[in-house]
Image: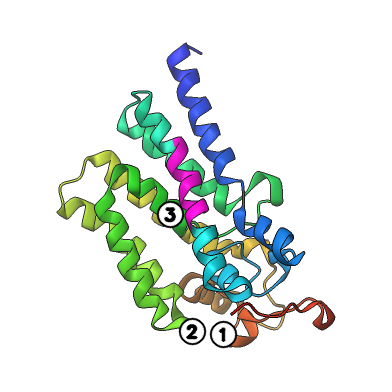
Amino acid sequence: MNNKLLGRALLILLGYLCGSVSFAYLAGRLWRAIDLRRYGSRKLSASNVHTYFGLGGLVLVGILDIAKAVWPTWLSIRLGYELAVTVWVGLAAMAGHNWPLFLGFRGGRGITTALGLLLCIFPGGVLWMLGWVAAGRLMPHVAAGPALLGFMGLPLFALWLHQPLATVWGCLGMLLLTILKRLEGNRQPIPPQESTWRVLWRRLVLDRDIADFETWARYQPNANERPARAH
């Protein structure tokens, strides 16, 4: 393996390791002494952080999750690597966020880390995704749907703005990672009383296993462990 190839591999590995640092998990442990993988949607995601730590927690964790993708991606640019390598580094950070090495590969959904990658290679894509996320916030019970539509339209938006081919492929990679993570359901088993196909459809479109949003978002492993909600 030559030095250039080794450098690329190490940068991609760095991206994955940075993405594997879950600030949502750390917030749960340090703030409320809970493991968010066992509460609410059981995702180490912005929505679950907002449920338990309010807007302040959402903003703090969101900024840190964006930064953990920005740093290795920016480093790739700073070191002079070609755009394709930079895209792979950012996608590795997103994969680390979705499947964190340190937390049994049970993480978030990657929207914030995708924003970090987009900040470095396609800033217009950040506005595109934020618009769809904002639309989802107006319909919290189906908020995951607009976010998915945002990822689906992102490659076409990049093409429309004449972005480099590597950027377009990177947008397709974000969509693929999002779909895989939703279908995988953070390694949760399919409820035995449910149709497998129905659950997979809900996971893809609604990012949850059951129809009842409130029951899903407020899940508690033990009622006695329930923390007070942040306001």
Residue type beneath disc 1? Phe
Query: Relative to 28, is 230 above or below?
Result: below
Image vertical order of residue 61 relative to residue 131, above or below: above
Q: What are the residue bounds of the magenta stretch?
A: 63-72
Image side of residue 39 versus residue 90, left or right: right
Label 1, residues with CA under 10 Å away: few <14, some 14-19, many ≥20 = some
Query: Does residue 109 appear in the picture of this structure?
Result: no
Q: Is residue 61 left or right of residue 114?
A: right
Earlier residue among tags 3 and 2? 2
* Rendered residue at 49%/59% (across/down): 62
Mark 2 surroundings: few (<14), some (14-19) or many (≥20) residues within 10 A: some
Residue 176 - label? 3
Pointer 1 residue: 213
On the image, numbered disc 2 is attached to which residue?
141
Comes first in the chain, label 1 or label 3: 3
Q: Is residue 111 visible?
A: yes
- Amino acid residing under circle 2: His
Q: How many neighbours does mark 3 have within 10 angstroms: few (below 14), some (14-19), or many (20 or more)?
A: some
Secondary element at image label 1: helix
Q: Is residue 159 magenta?
A: no
Q: Are marks 2 and 1 in contact (CB under 8 Å)?
A: yes
